[in-house]
Image: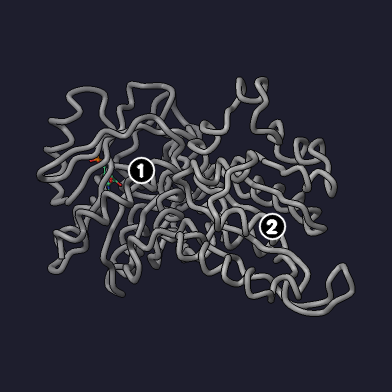
């Protein structure tokens, strides 16, 4: 479960140690999970692995020197410190940990470590005797007291032939630990039900009425809710996106099926209901049993209104906190607030669909969120970002709802 790493910015510091070869794999895993990676290497690290290798894997120039005018003209050390969401040093040698614990800033890595407000973590790697040394353990305790996360080394056979604790964790474990650092806990223990994607309304055995909803917003929200510690049921119409890890997905086709699945899921317990689905407003009054034949130049199809799923759930006694979505082209605030009241929602997120660069099929979105006594504009950003902000807003308002 690495979804929390999507669009996260990681500065990976590499200090001198044979475990540096594992950092190459770590860069690849972090990037595969959707993170951006900038690599900083100490002089000693470059004895073990080349900057060129790390540049190729990270897709960015590697930073090696503090007082290099060319490098500072690109991304300087302060800029790098500000850019990061996480600074991870892996491997962290005994020497680098001693310098970090002291607050020494005598190279690029230790300087940016001091200058950052990002999360900070170290993955120590050293000989077992060096790891066990009292001064190393004191340095570890000092770093922890400074708020640094220490990814404790594993035990086993070491490169030097010793056996004991001091082996750096494997890249796959470190990537997971990094992802875990971004779990927010905002919805810990909460149950969230999300509707997503389009619905398909059958006309006959082979034809249907539907829309272009991709489901991306609902799936991004599902991931953001998992990241926030919630238990998530995702009720989705036909979409082409992989189910996020740990999400219980219920696949439906029509609006009536989506309503029934929503009612069932809510009956099992639900604290927050998020309606992102683009439910077809109407369905054919009758589904033809056989394929409709091509007769005549004009045919009419009678349509009947579908139930409003979010409004139906909002009628329940003990209703969950309700987040709805709206797409408007004009008078966004007026229409959004009217919908907030009409559907008995607690919050509504509104897309301006007159913009062509966001929305339906796009990976980006921008929206304005309204609740009873407030509003917030969310600038254009990847749906994963927007989803995280929405979850944070819901979590804040949920406290008032309880
Ligand atoms: O009324 P409108 O379709 O603009 O409302 C959009 C909001 O209502 C969305 O949150 C959508 O998921 C929800 N909705 C629903 N059932 C419907 C129609 C819309 O849950 N039949």
Residue 129, visible in the rendered structure: yes
The residue shown at (28%, 66%) is 263
Left or right for 2, reference 315 = right
Identify which residue, 272 or 313, lies in the foreground. Answer: 272
The label nearer to you, 1 versus 2, is 2
Residue farthest right in this picture: 161
Instruction: Please state the quadrant of the image where ligand 1 appears.
Output: top left
Relative vertical location of residue 14 with respect to residue 133 in this rendering, above or below = above
Q: Mark 2 points at which residue?
A: 95
Marks 1 and 2 in Cβ contact (< 8 Å): no
User: For mark 2, does the 10 Å Cα neighbourhood hold few (<14), some (14 to 19), or many (20 or more) residues?
Assistant: few
Residue sitting nearer the eye, 108 or 298: 108
Image point (64%, 49%), residue name: 30
Q: Name the residue under label 1.
A: 278
Name the quarter where the C terminus is drawn. Answer: bottom left
Ligand 1 within 8 Å of disc 1? The answer is yes
* Image x and y of residue 111, in percent: 57, 41
Instruction: State how the image is colored.
Output: one colour
Query: Could you say whether the residue bearing mark 2 is in a helix, strand or loop?
Result: helix
From where the camera sits, is residue 207 visible?
A: no
| Residue at the image point whose x is 73% and y is 70% from the top | 130
Tell me the element at label 1: loop
Image position, residue 116 (x, y; %)? 48, 43
**Count of numbered tags:** 2
Q: In this view, does 331 lie to the left or right of 138?
A: left
- The quarter of the picture where the N terminus appears is bottom right
Tag shown at residue 53: none
* Among numbered discs 1 and 2, the one appearing first in the sequence: 2
Does the closest atom of ligand 1 sit within 8 Å of the Cβ of label 2?
A: no
């Amino acid at each position: 479960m690495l979804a929390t790493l999507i669009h996260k910015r990681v500065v990976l510091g590499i200090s001198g140690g044979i475990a540096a070869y594992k950092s190459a794999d770590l860069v690849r895993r972090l990037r595969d999970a959707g993170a951006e990676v900038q690599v900083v290497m100490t002089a000693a690290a470059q004895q073990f692995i080349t900057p060129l290798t790390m540049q190729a894997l990270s897709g960015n120039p590697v930073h090696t020197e503090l007082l290099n005018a060319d490098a500072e003209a690109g991304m300087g050390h302060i800029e790098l410190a500000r850019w990061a969401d996480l600074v991870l040093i892996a491997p962290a040698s005994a020497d680098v940990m001693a310098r970090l614990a002291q607050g020494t800033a005598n190279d690029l890595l230790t300087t940016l470590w001091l200058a950052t407000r990002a999360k900070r973590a170290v993955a120590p790697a050293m000989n077992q005797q060096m790891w066990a040394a009292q001064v190393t353990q004191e340095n570890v305790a000092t770093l922890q007291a400074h708020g640094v996360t220490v990814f404790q080394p594993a035990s086993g056979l070491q490169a030097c032939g010793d056996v004991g604790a001091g082996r750096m964790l494997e890249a796959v474990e470190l990537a997971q630990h990094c992802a875990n650092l971004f779990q927010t806990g905002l919805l810990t223990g909460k149950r969230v039900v999300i509707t997503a994607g389009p619905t398909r309304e059958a006309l006959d055995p082979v034809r249907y009425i539907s829309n272009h909803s991709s489901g991306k917003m609902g799936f991004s929200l599902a991931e953001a809710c998992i990241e926030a510690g919630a238990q998530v049921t995702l009720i989705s119409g036909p979409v082409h996106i992989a189910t996020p890890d740990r999400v219980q997905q219920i696949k439906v086709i029509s609006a009536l099926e989506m309503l029934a699945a929503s009612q069932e899921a809510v009956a099992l317990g639900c604290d927050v209901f998020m309606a992102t689905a683009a439910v077809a407003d109407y369905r054919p009054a009758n589904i033809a049993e056989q394929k409709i034949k091509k007769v005549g130049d004009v045919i009419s199809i009678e349509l009947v209104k579908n139930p409003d799923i979010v409004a139906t759930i909002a009628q329940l006694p003990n209703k969950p906190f309700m987040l709805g979505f709206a797409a408007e082209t004009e008078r966004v605030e007026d229409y959004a607030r009217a919908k907030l009241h009409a559907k008995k929602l607690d919050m509504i997120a509104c897309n301006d669909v007159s913009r062509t660069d966001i929305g339906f099929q796009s990976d980006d979105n921008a929206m304005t969120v309204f609740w009873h006594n407030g509003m917030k504009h969310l600038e254009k950003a990847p749906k994963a970002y927007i989803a995280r902000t929405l979850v944070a807003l819901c979590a804040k308002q949920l406290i008032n709802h309880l």
